[in-house]
Amino acid sequence: MTVPTLEIQSLTLGLKGGARLLRDVSLSVKPGEVHALVGESGAGKSMIGKAVLGVLPPSVQTLSGSINLQGNQLDALSPAARRQAVASVASLIPQDPLTALNPSRRIGPQITDRLIKRLGWKADDAQRRALELLDRVRIRDPQRVMASYPHELSGGMRQRVLIAAAFAPRPKLIVADEPTTALDVTVQKQILALIRELQQQEQTAVLFVTHDMGVVAKISQRVSVLFAGKVMESSDTADIFSHPKHPYTQALIMATPRYTHPDEALRPVPAELIAQLQREIAADDRGAAHVR
Amino acid sequence: MADAALTAVTQPRARVRKPNPRLWLSLTWILIVVVAAVGAQWLAPHNPLEQDLLLERLPPLGFSGSEASYILGTDSLGRDVLSRLIYGARIALAVALAASFAACLTGSLLGLAAGYFGGWTDRIVSRFIDIWMSFPPVLFAVLLVAVLGTGLGSVILAIAIIDWTRFARVVRAETMVQSRMDYVYSARIGGATRLRILAAEVLPNVLPTIAALLALEMGVAVIVEAILSFVNLSISSDSPTWGSMIAEGRATLHFAWWVLVFPLVVLFLTVLSFSQLGQGLKDQFDPLSR
């Protein structure tokens, strides 16, 4: 039995002032495993990634629960120690390649900075590692790209650079926050394949945030389905498509358009189901408040 | 086929850079003013303070009654207008540079701190800016110089004290925008400290804005100095300034228009050049508008 890279236990997040963002979320990701977080906008998928990486907005606080990353109990650490613990084992592949690279700095230092400044690599080694990864994400002429500014690259190319930058420090965990949402469909496919390939070669654990069930099927081994900050169902990807247990999961799968049936009407998640789930969650919240 | 698609994706766009007439014209005029200011004692054909009542109100070259060595004519005390303009450039530039840099430094530092750290820092700085900007600036300047006493130093200080808010407000807003960009998140996840993020990630992206504001502010400083000279609150009357020339020329406008018009034109061109330089700099260096 392998030790999980990331283990989240009963994580509950709330805004200062009351509203709950995550409710009692537990999940774990093993080395080399891709765990997809799926749900609609506002379900709290990105919030989980932010909590792990320690970049929650200041208005959000952790109400209960714990996060264990590569043997470090993150919530028990001081802010500085936590920053160091995260920086040495985790990376982010962000959503929007247009704002995720600093427009006034060259690509090279944006990849190597972290290796040299935080992880203590030699400049030569960092340079070599960056070139190697740019090559592995199929960027031609990596030397020239390292010396370029972001505005000289296309969106798809910038996303490749970001993937290279995320994998460069040999992270144990990568949080991929909808990394293909801002790209067009043909580029999306290439990018997914690249993430999959690198992740398998490096045996990296990946927390993959998406709202696209098609992407879930292509990339992940495990899935957690979220609704209103609560995990509805968590299981193997293969099982969830063949035997979805929770009605919300069933509705989500039904809502995915099928290329094999181009004429059929879209089937959105039924409003009654959403209303019912919201009532249940509200009742839970009252119960929790009562216990406290 | 897949290869062809990849080539298309990986071909960086060529950088096209057109010459920017706005930038070059304004730089040329500013260079002329700088040369005049630096080389005043060699360039000026006459002593700007020398009065000669026999030569009063000579018209500029080309008008009847003009004299060859007084190219732009003389004022009502017989002083050479061109020489006074050239010496006036010294004071205009000294004020423009010193006052703008002082205002820029104060305002940008406060703006960066407020925009980046937010919270109480932001609240305090923002309230200060609000209060400061509720004073009418020219009246504020006149009051300040009246309190500080006339002289080059007090004019510079007064302009810096009034105009730091221009920098603080804009730099604060720009810093807030930049601080929420994904690359700042990435740097935080990469373990960079807050100060390092501010210096390496945020500041370089705010600099084009600061540079543009700085050029604009130089124009504003020239105007404010002229206004203070106009109401006799700038430098003592034995050093020629454009503002005091305009004030004197006003009295004789009907029979010696050149005493007023030439300093006005020079002032106008200088202020225009600084503001165009600001816009030109922003176009040239802002990575997003390239």
Image (cartoon, coloured by chain):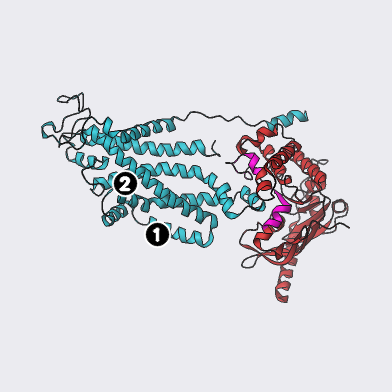
Chain colours: A red, B cyan
Q: Is residue A224 visible?
A: yes
Q: Which residue is mark 1?
A: B131
The picture places residue A166, in percent across and down from the top left corner, at 71, 46
Quadrant of the snapshot with the C terminus of chain B: top right
In the displayed structure image, the side of residue A39 where residue B278 appears, left or right: left
Q: Residue furthest bottom?
A: A291
Residue B26 in the image: state x and y as whole percent.
39, 33
Tag 1: residue type?
A: Ile
Q: Is residue B136 left or right of residue B258?
A: right
x and y percent of residue A230 in the render? 75, 62
In the image, the segment drawn in magenta is A83-110
In this rendering, is residue A287 above or below B6? below
A276 or A57: nearer the viewer? A57
The residue drawn where x is 21% and y is 43% is B238
The residue beneath circle 2 is: B224
- What is the three-letter code of the residue carrying label 2? Val
Q: Quadrant of residue A103?
A: top right
- Mark 2, other Cα within 10 Å: few <14 / some 14–19 / many ≥20: many
Q: How many discs mark residues in the rendered view? A: 2
Please report, as a chain letter, where disc 1 is located: B
Pick whichever, B36 or B280, lies toward us: B36
Give the spatial CA distance, label 2 vs label 1. 20 Å
Q: Please give the name of the residue rendered at 89% of the width and 58% of the height, measured from the top-left corner.
A: A1
The answer to whether residue A232 is left or right of residue B267 is: right
Q: Is residue A72 above or below residue B64?
A: below
Q: Secondary structure at mark 2?
A: helix
Q: Residues within 10 Å of mark 1 (few under 14, many from 20)?
A: few
